[in-house]
Image: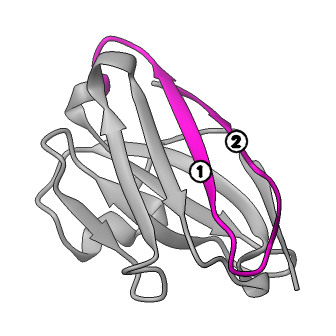
Amino acid sequence: VQLQASGGGLVQAGGSLRVSCVASGRTFGSYVMGWFRQAPGKEREFVAAISWSASTYYAGSVKGRFTISRDNAKNTVYLQMNSLKPEETAVYYCAARPWSKPGAGWANVYEYDSWGQGTQVTVSS
């Protein structure tokens, strides 16, 4: 599956932003879709993931502020980010992995085999 992320930009601290990821390929529905982020000089970290049936899994740091969703008819996954913090400035990547039961495995960057190009999110203080 090929992935194309978009929607990044500049937002003030406390603001909101929604990023999107469009997938190509007939088997979109069979994948778990995830969002990761990577700040300069830091490792790529898990943000959120969602299955075809809308089961979700979040990093603790974003739970309650970020919402992941998907529209299988549009082959699109979204990440709604609220109450953004300056330290969340990063390139946000969408990724796809084969289906597995919801859990910690969804946060494992090495279990994702398709990646989008990333979209920059900058949160100003």
Are circles 1 and 2 on residues that touch, CB within 8 Å? Answer: yes
At label 1, the amino acid type is Arg
Q: Where is residue 70 drawn, in percent x and y?
A: 33, 39
Q: Residue at x 38, y 70 (%)?
A: 107
At mark 1, the secondary structure is strand
Give the dominant element type of the magenta stretch: helix, strand or loop. Answer: strand
Which quadrant of the view contains residue 58? bottom left
**Residue range highlighted in magenta:** 2-28
Task: Please indicate whether residue 102 sits to the left or right of residue 34 in the image.
Answer: left
Using residue 40 as the reference point, say whether residue 109 is left or right of it.
Answer: left
Q: Does residue 57 appear to the left or right of 82 in the view shown?
A: left
Quadrant showing the C terminus: bottom right
* Label 2 Cα neighbours within 10 Å, binned few <14 / some 14-19 / many ≥20: some
State which quadrant residue 7 falls in: top right
Q: Amino acid at mark 2?
A: Gly
Mark on residue 98? none
Q: Quadrant of residue 56?
A: bottom left
Residue drawn at point x = 49 percent, y = 53 percent: 79
Which residue in the structure is indicated by mark 2?
7
- Picture layout, residue 48 above or below residue 8: below
Please check the rendered image and state whether residue 20 is part of the magenta-colored stretch, yes or no.
yes
Crowd band around label 1 with a 10 angstrom C-alpha radius: few (<14), some (14–19), many (20+): some
Q: Which mark is residue 18?
A: 1
